[in-house]
Image (spheres, rainbow, N blue to C red):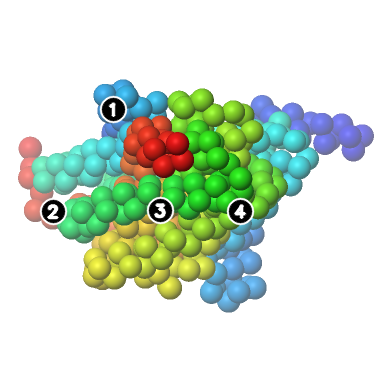
Amino acid sequence: MLHDIWHGIEHVFIEQSLVAAFAVVGGLILVSNLAAKRLTNGRVHGSAIAIVLGLVLAYFGGLYTGGKKGVADIPALAGIGLMGGAMLRDFAIVATAFEVDVIEARRAGLLGVLALALGTILPFIVGTLTAVAFGYHDAVSITTIGAGAITYIVGPVTGAAIGADSTVMALSIATGVTKAVMVMVGTPLVAKLIGLDNPRSAMAYGGLMGTVSGVAGGLAATDPKLVPYGALTATFHTGIGCLVGPSIFFLTVRALVG
Amino acid sequence: MIVLGVGLLATCTLIGVYLGDLLGIALGVKANVGGVGIAMILLIAARVWLDRRGRLSKGVKFGVEFWAGMYIPIVVAMAAQQNVVAALTGGPIVIIAAVGSLVLCFGAVAILSRFGGRSALGPEAAHAGSVIEGEADDIAAAPVGHNTARREG
């Protein structure tokens, strides 16, 4: 009997996947807002708690299913995959642009370009140095791991273009994913320290952090009104990384390590 | 009409992503280059254009701002489908590369935001914040457009 009821609920969740995702995420945010109010006295943003909670669920979902898509690999929660997938994510990010202060965004344009350049070069250098320190000596592996430190898309795109082997690719993707997760969790913690409280610094932040999912999550957890400014620069980051990774960066690394 | 706002948003997104794909092909990159950013710029331009002609109706605004308000829930759903297991079991090389680049980039944000100087946020930004945070009252109560002198006919 109990099993039948459970089976029926599961069936509804599978059939109504996107609607079920709205209900589940709504519940998650409700709980997070209550926790933010009651447990932290409003010091921590409700959305920051919700994002961390989402990551924790993704961890257990991943352990349970052995898949790569967190809770979205559980059939009854597959709608989370659609709701939080690239299509609706980009749609919502574009919608936030409706709230952009055009004058501010234009004034910070040059700063954004500078941030994009630094945000591509700095992580790449850190990634390549780490790879060398851990005993990688060939230009292809070093470049692929370095590119993974830019974002988890730049890593595999670069690796595929220059012919890296699959273990190095996996390492490169893992580096990018770890960075994205850390950006989501770390941003609200350091926001004050790095002056992330106005459109200009948000545009610098978007260009430097790059990873769209990291920036989207990090700014949502810190201060929602800064979201469009950060997203505006971050969206160019992956493309630029994919442009320079297999070309300029690879050639430079190859020239250095021979 | 609300659907006109949603349609405008969708059209801007499609055009932006398409142009981003073209830019990627032109640069010889296997990725979309700035598609979302281009879409955002298109939407900003559309808002300014509609506002000037007095065509930025409450419905159109609501259609777009509803999706801006869904931003955080969508990000939460996105967080729930990350490959966190891979991130936590990647080993020292992954952790060191990720933490190292993170610390360096946070530092660079601190330096750049000092260079850029602080910009003040007006009441419009407060409205933007509450829309993206998903406060519906604010959307409904918001003044329609910045241009109050509306052209008729």
Q: Give the SS element for disc 2.
A: loop
Which one is in front in this view, the residue at disc 2 or the one at disc 1? 1
Residue placed under numbered mark 4 in the picture: B95
Compare residues A193 and A71 and report the one nearer the observer: A193
Is residue A250 positioned above or below A39 on the image? above
Dots 2 and 1 on the same chain: yes
For residue B27, the mark is 1
Mark pair 2, 3: CA separation: 44 Å
Disc nearest the viewer among 2 and 4: 4
Q: Say which of marks 2 and 3 sits in front.
A: 3
Please tell me which residue is depicted at 27% across the width and 53% down the height of the picture: A114
Sequence-wise first label, 2 or 1? 1
Determine if marks 2 and 4 fall on one subunit: yes
Residue A46 location in percent, x, y? 55, 63
Say what amino acid the circle numbered 1 marks. Answer: Leu
Labels 1 and 3 within one chain: no
Cα gap from disc 2 to disc 1, whole angstroms: 40 Å
Name the secondary structure under disc 3: helix
- Mark 4, secondary structure of its residue: helix
Q: Which subunit holds the residue at mark 4?
A: B
**Above or below for A41 versus A102:** below
To which quarter of the image does residue A256 belong? Answer: top left
Mark 3 in CB contact with mark 4 (< 8 angstroms): no
The kind of residue on which mark 3 rests is Leu
Residue B68 at what x, y percent from top left? 39, 47
As measured in the structure, the alpha-carbon distance from the residue carrying label 4 to the one carrying label 1 is 32 Å
Q: Residues within 10 Å of mark 2 (few under 14, many from 20)?
A: some
State if disc 1 and disc 4 touch (CB < 8 Å).
no
